């Protein structure tokens, strides 16, 4: 049997997830997450609109991260219990074939030196030997277009080329979701429209970050011979009219009257959790922000309130007279 040309769409040819992310097998969860973020930023389709290969690299990195980020799956992969796609490895299949013995469904005479690799055996199961339908132990093959035994499904397939395999899914789709700081802070549920037009209600994870992806299983492209792909919802923070993010800290502006700034007052201040009342001290220094501790994003930072003094509209003769009196009788400096 001649050597088959590798098919880049074959799931059993998925690259080692450690290789995909460029990390050693001893990498910590933090190292894996950091490596994925770099690749996601580099290959995100939005950043590479003219590079048709970017989507594939992005999806490959996402799949590798999903596997290694799951402690149970990572352990199974490291022990050789599952492959790079996350599917169980078949009992009796080794790196060297059947170890020199003819196994169930093996071609007569296939137990020569070196035997068959698992890939060769699976190819023969799937397509028959010598291009002809395969019969023998493990199942019977019909004529052209007839049913054919599928080692992945464990029964009869729907015909040549229609075999299914656990994990052989439709394409993943990438969707952007614009999220307000308030919704991100509360880990709220937001509506997201799929490319098909379908609306989904998506729960944001706790402490979601800009560029983080949320995987919606089975919401991607349908597959006639297997399960549908997934939807990867990429979080984008919406520009707020009220708040400015500074890492974990948040800043906002509050307008006050001249007499509130001079005499002091209680004013309502917006926060990510809703409005609170702030005691404004008499003669407040508007050059310094007032800090509300623990009122920043996710409670990890603080809220800084900048006070803006607003003069009465249209001017005021009495205020102008007071200002002239202070300028002439009680001047003070605010600039060097």
Image: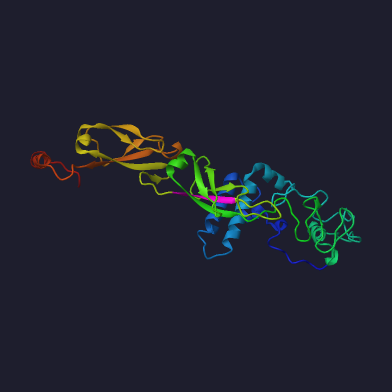
**Residue 80 place in picture, x, y as percent:** 74, 48
Which segment is the magenta one?
231-237
The reply, left or right, for residue 95 in relation to residue 275 is right
Taking the image as shown, residue 211 lies to the left or right of residue 1, namely left
Classify the position of the N terminus by image quarter: bottom right
What's the residue at 74%, 53% (across, down)? Answer: 165
Within the magenta stretch, is there residue 201? no
Question: Of helix, strand and loop, which mostly describes the magenta segment?
Answer: strand
Q: Nearer the viewer, residue 30 or 302?
A: 302
* Count of marks, rendered view: 0
**From this viewpoint, is residue 208 visible?**
no
Q: Quadrant of residue 309?
A: top left
Q: Nearer the viewer, residue 218 or 95?
A: 218
Residue drawn 49% across and 44% down?
190
Determine the residue located farthest toward the right in the rendered image: 109
Q: Position of residue 186 (x, y in %)?
A: 47, 38
Q: Quadrant of residue 322?
A: top left
């Amino acid at each position: 049997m001649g050597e088959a040309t590798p098919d880049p769409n074959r799931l059993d040819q998925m690259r080692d997830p450690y290789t995909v992310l460029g990390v050693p097998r001893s990498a910590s969860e933090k190292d894996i997450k950091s490596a994925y973020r770099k690749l996601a930023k580099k290959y995100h389709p939005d950043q590479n609109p003219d590079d048709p290969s970017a989507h594939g690299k992005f999806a490959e990195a996402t799949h590798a991260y999903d596997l290694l980020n799951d402690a149970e799956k990572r352990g199974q992969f490291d022990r050789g219990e599952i492959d790079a796609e996350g599917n169980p490895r078949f009992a009796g299949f080794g790196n060297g074939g059947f170890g020199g013995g003819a196994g169930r469904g093996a071609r007569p005479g296939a137990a020569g030196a070196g035997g068959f690799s698992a890939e060769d055996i699976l190819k023969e199961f799937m397509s028959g030997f010598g291009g002809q339908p395969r019969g023998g132990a493990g199942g019977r093959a019909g004529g052209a277009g007839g049913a054919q035994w599928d080692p992945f499904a464990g029964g009869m397939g729907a015909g040549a080329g229609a075999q299914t395999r656990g994990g052989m899914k439709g394409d993943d789709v990438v969707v952007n979701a614009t999220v307000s700081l308030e919704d991100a802070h509360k880990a709220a549920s937001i509506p997201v429209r799929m490319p098909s037009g379908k609306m989904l209600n998506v729960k944001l994870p706790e402490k979601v970050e800009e560029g983080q992806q949320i995987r919606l299983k089975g919401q991607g492209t349908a597959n006639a011979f297997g399960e549908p792909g997934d939807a990867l919802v990429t979080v984008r923070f919406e520009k707020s009219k009220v708040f400015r993010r500074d890492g974990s800290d948040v800043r906002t502006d509050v307008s006050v009257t001249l007499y509130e700034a001079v005499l002091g007052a209680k004013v309502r201040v917006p926060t990510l959790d809703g409005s609170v009342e702030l005691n404004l001290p008499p003669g407040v220094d508007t050059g310094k922000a007032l800090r509300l501790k623990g009122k920043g994003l996710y409670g990890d930072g603080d809220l800084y309130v900048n006070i803006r003094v607003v003069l009465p509209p249209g001017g005021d003769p009495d205020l102008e007279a007071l200002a002239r009196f202070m300028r002439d009788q009680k001047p003070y400096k605010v600039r060097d």
